[in-house]
Image (cartoon, rainbow, N blue to C red):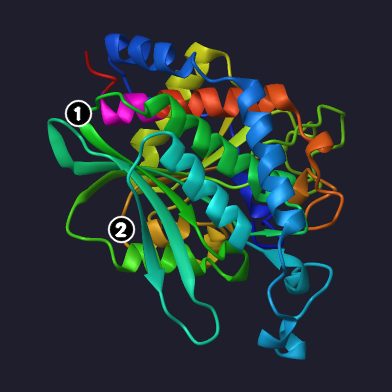
Amino acid sequence: MRPLFAALLFLAVSSCASRATPDEAALSRAGDFAAGVQGQRLMSDVDALVASHREDTPLDCGLFAPSEIDTARRPVCNLTRDKARQLVRERFESLGYTVTTHDTEDPRFPTSNVIAELRGTERPDEVVVVGAHYDAYFSGADDNSSGVAAMLEMARLASGKRFARTVRFVGFDLEELGLVGSTRYVSALPREKIVTSIVFDCVGYKDATPGAQLGLPGFPIPNTGDFIAAIANERSNVRLEELYALGTRLGVSLRGVLTPEDGTGPATGNLMRSDHAPFWMAGQSSIFLTDTANFRNPHYHTARDVPATLDPDFLTDVTRLSAAGLAYWAEGPLP
């Protein structure tokens, strides 16, 4: 996740009161699908991704002017992604997916988004996207191996199954440098209907200690970091309500954040610091899931962001909720 995830987020946090009336049979089917999430597999993937970052060669600092290097908030000299990209590709392929890449040549920062797709059987031009960025500072356990692991686990569950709509998993490149890969990906999207996208960035850190969750003094902000934040704009509001209904059913603590209008105004600009933002700017539905990064996790963007600091049960719950959302929105698995 890019630095300084805004405190403004917490001004909008509330227990999202759902106005949607989701179909009970679809909710039940989604819950059954999500029950297959395995916490041990999630943490195994986190460990493998962290190892890939530790073994990789960081991006060349010479690509940056001295004014672009901020060792505290944006430690670009410790950014890796090549080995993580290869791991994501290999995991998709091992699950039986035909993997493609969306490549953009650039003299300074070429990008390669890794894509695995399960074609819909009834409405293939309607797509549900699951995305997470695979680049990371240092070993990047929470930011963002946790999100990539959630995506890979959902890909495992979906593999070989049938959904009415197309399901697409995308590993985004160079989020940490300004949403580079996702911006290029969205700008090149073909004419198709994105039912919604769900984007993960920092989804594995929990601290229920009073005072662990930072915010602004004087506002009714939760001070315990024991929830997942789900951020949507008005176009994505129905999906947020459906996700809340699923969270209630699955017993997952969810705090909903609804930004005004399309979410791109000056008051909400700091809520757009991850890969959901290009979807919003293109008029597409997208929901962003996060543990709020540096507003909760003291290890954010440091060498201390390691697997031992994560909460496996919390990560498992977030993945279960997201898997249920995927099944609900993609309308499956079908018999």
Q: Position of residue 117 (x, y in %)?
A: 31, 43
Asked whether the viewer can see residue 264, the reply is no
Q: Position of residue 331 (x, y in %)?
A: 26, 25
Per the image, label 1 sits on a secondary structure element best described as: loop
Q: Name the side, left or right, on which 264 lies relative to 161.
A: right
Q: Residues within 10 Å of mark 1 (few under 14, many from 20)?
A: many
Observer-nearest of 156 and 245: 156
Tag shown at residue 164: 1
Q: Name the side, left or right, on which 272 lies relative to 23.
A: right
Q: Earlier in the sequence, mark 2 or mark 1?
A: 1
Tag shown at residue 283: 2
Question: Residue 38 lies in what quarter of the image?
Answer: top right
Look at 68% across and 63% down and name the residue there.
80
Q: Position of residue 91 (x, y in %)?
A: 50, 40
Per the image, label 2 sits on a secondary structure element best described as: loop
Please give the range of residues in magenta. Answer: 326-331
**Which label sits in the foreground, 2 or 1?**
1
Circle 2: residue type: Gly
208 above or below 96? Answer: above
Q: Position of residue 303 (x, y in %)?
A: 85, 55
Q: Residues within 10 Å of mark 2 (few under 14, many from 20)?
A: few
92 part of magenta stretch: no
Asked whether the viewer can see residue 92, the reply is yes
